[in-house]
Image (cartoon, coloured by chain):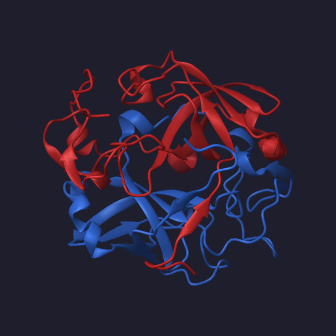
Chain colours: A blue, B red
Amino acid sequence: MLDARMKLTLKPIGVIHSPYKTKEKTPIQGIFRPEGTGWVELYPEYEEGLKDIDSFSHIFIIYSLDRAGRVELVRPTLLDDQPHGIFACRYPSRPNGIGLTIVRLLERKANMLKIGGIDVLDNTPLLDIKPYVPRFDSFPQASEGWFAGKQERPKPPGRE
Amino acid sequence: MLDARMKLTLKPIGVIHSPYKTKEKTPIQGIFRPEGTGWVELYPEYEEGLKDIDSFSHIFIIYSLDRAGRVELVRPTLLDDQPHGIFACRYPSRPNGIGLTIVRLLERKANMLKIGGIDVLDNTPLLDIKPYVPRFDSFPQASEGWFAGKQERPKPPGRE
């Protein structure tokens, strides 16, 4: 069993192709650019694991935030200039650098998935795909926390 | 940047304390045991990163499926005896072994979070916490895919 002194080694299982080549152009959340599409490419040795994926309209993609900057545990974020804890926001520079987003699954072609509502940088390493199941994952009554009322805005300079 | 030949090293940031000591007793999904509570313990050096977490009713917890068995890319699952691709199901034995669950945040005491609707094994290594924001994460209209109509059942022998 892992503990505080142990480490876990992961290996990318594919790569995410996105129209967003820079952090500046990458949307803060996919819902702010629902029209943005991209492709998830699974390395061919994993293709078999996609069986039945096309029965889902939405999927989670889990990836490595491989170009994120220095981690600060409390910091201003993209949607708010007030400092928030890193575990109370979705800012990309975070311990372990794991990214999570929910996208629309538009099409499957062999080991490639066309996705909509993407908010990741081009060439992002893919770590996992899980089906989004509203019975398990949709909580419309959940609180918005400090995000309540925060609107999309240009990314403040120096933030990513 | 990572590619297929590179590796990513993660370090647990805490540990999840759960009433479920065995795979057999661990619920398939949290919604099947909403009354089950546990504690997420963040190692003290990360406590500062919880600032404002208590403004959220629900959080994502991302963890290591550290006791999962052998990965099969296509396999029968916990809710269905038909084989499905590992990326089209939530089965725990999967490439990279990253677990994801959405839980209710009930209480914060310093570096400890009391959570409800837990579906993880006791002593599971914690990798990340993110706030669940319904505007970004709730898609009640998403399809249930092959999960449609599947009801909770005892875990079939030999599955975890």
Q: Residue at x 45, y 68 (%)?
A: A126
User: Total of numbered circles in the picture?
Assistant: 0
Residue A149 seen in the figure: no
Residue B158 figure quarter:
top left
Does B119 sit left or right of A152 as displayed? left
Q: Looking at the picture, how far across and down is residue A22, in whole percent?
A: 62, 82
In which quadrant is the N terminus of chain A drawn? top right
Between residue A79 and residue A70, name the one nearer to us: A70
Q: Tell me if residue A129 comes above or below residue A157 in the rendering.
A: above
Does B150 sit left or right of B128 as displayed? left
Q: Looking at the picture, how far across and down is residue B96, in whole percent?
A: 44, 57
Residue B22 seen in the figure: yes
In which quadrant is the C terminus of chain A drawn? bottom right
Q: Looking at the picture, how far across and down is residue A13, in whole percent?
A: 39, 68
Q: Tell me if residue A37 comes above or below residue A82 in the rendering.
A: below
Furthest residue toward left: B82
Q: Residue at x 57, y 81 (%)?
A: B1
Q: Looking at the picture, how far across and down is residue B42, in whole percent?
A: 73, 38
Q: Tell me if residue A90 comes above or below residue A107 in the rendering.
A: above
Residue B91 figure quarter:
top left
Does B104 sit left or right of B146 as displayed? right
Q: Residue at x 86, y 53 (%)?
A: A82
